[in-house]
Amino acid sequence: MKKLILSIAVVIAVLVGCKSSTSSNVKKLTIAFEAKSNSKVSGTATFVEKNGKVTFVATLSGLQPGVHAIHIHEKSDCSAADGSSAGGHWNPTFKNHGKWGVGEYHKGDIGNFTADAKGNGSITLTTDEWNMGSGDQTKDILGKGLIVHQGADDFTSQPSGNAGARVACSAIIK
């Protein structure tokens, strides 16, 4: 009987340990955008880190219909009316600006998304090139800014893709 109770206790301890380690390996952060450059843009972005990958989802409204760029910028400072306080694109590996996953690109070069006729749009990206809170200067997105631009990224103009005014900003902070 003692062996059975001990075996059950061991199984419970293992199961509890597995459950807590799984939940502690998931990090989630949701941030809200603030309008910039006299726009009416609003929305949220969510970052979920699990199993060494970060999934990013941004949902926005109040945009002009059409294609818009979104990038991670150097600073978590959205204080300037035009969003310029967020600095340039986050580029910790000193690459040329480009299209995510094709040739050279900044770690902050997320890409373009389309706003519908009502000004609503969203974008999703999953990557192992980011993390949240590791302190690794080449991967850690905490302490950066997230910027939505008025126009599309052309993926070639240096250093930022000629995407136009910054119409929304959010700090990537806990």
Image (cartoon, rainbow, N blue to C red):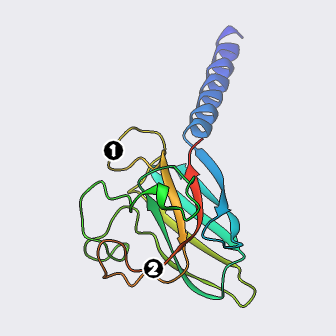
Residue in view at x 37 percent, y 50 percent: 139
69 on left or right of 35: left
Residue in view at x 31 percent, y 81 percent: 157
Vertical placement of residue 149 versus 134, above or below: below
Which quadrant holds residue 56? bottom right
Residue in view at x 62 percent, y 66 percent: 36
136 on left or right of 38: left
- Residue 148 image point, x, y percent: 55, 70
Q: Amino acid at mark 1?
A: Gln
- Residue 59 image point, x, y percent: 67, 69
What secondary structure is marked by label 1? loop
- Residue 14 image point, x, y percent: 59, 27
Most extreme residue toward the right, as rendered?
Answer: 118
Q: Is residue 48 visible?
A: no
Screen quadrant of the C terminus: top right
Which quadrant holds residue 18? top right
Q: Is residue 36 visible?
A: yes
- Residue 107 image point, x, y percent: 36, 61
Q: How many marks?
A: 2
Dot 1 crowding, Cα within 10 Å, few <14, some 14–19, many 20+: few
Dot 2 crowding, Cα within 10 Å, few <14, some 14–19, many 20+: many
Screen quadrant of the N terminus: top right
131 on left or right of 28: left
Q: Which residue is mark 2?
A: 163
Which one is in front, 6 or 50?
A: 50
Q: Which residue is mark 1?
A: 137
Most extreme residue toward the top, as rendered?
Answer: 2
132 on left or right of 59: left
Q: Amino acid at mark 2?
A: Ala
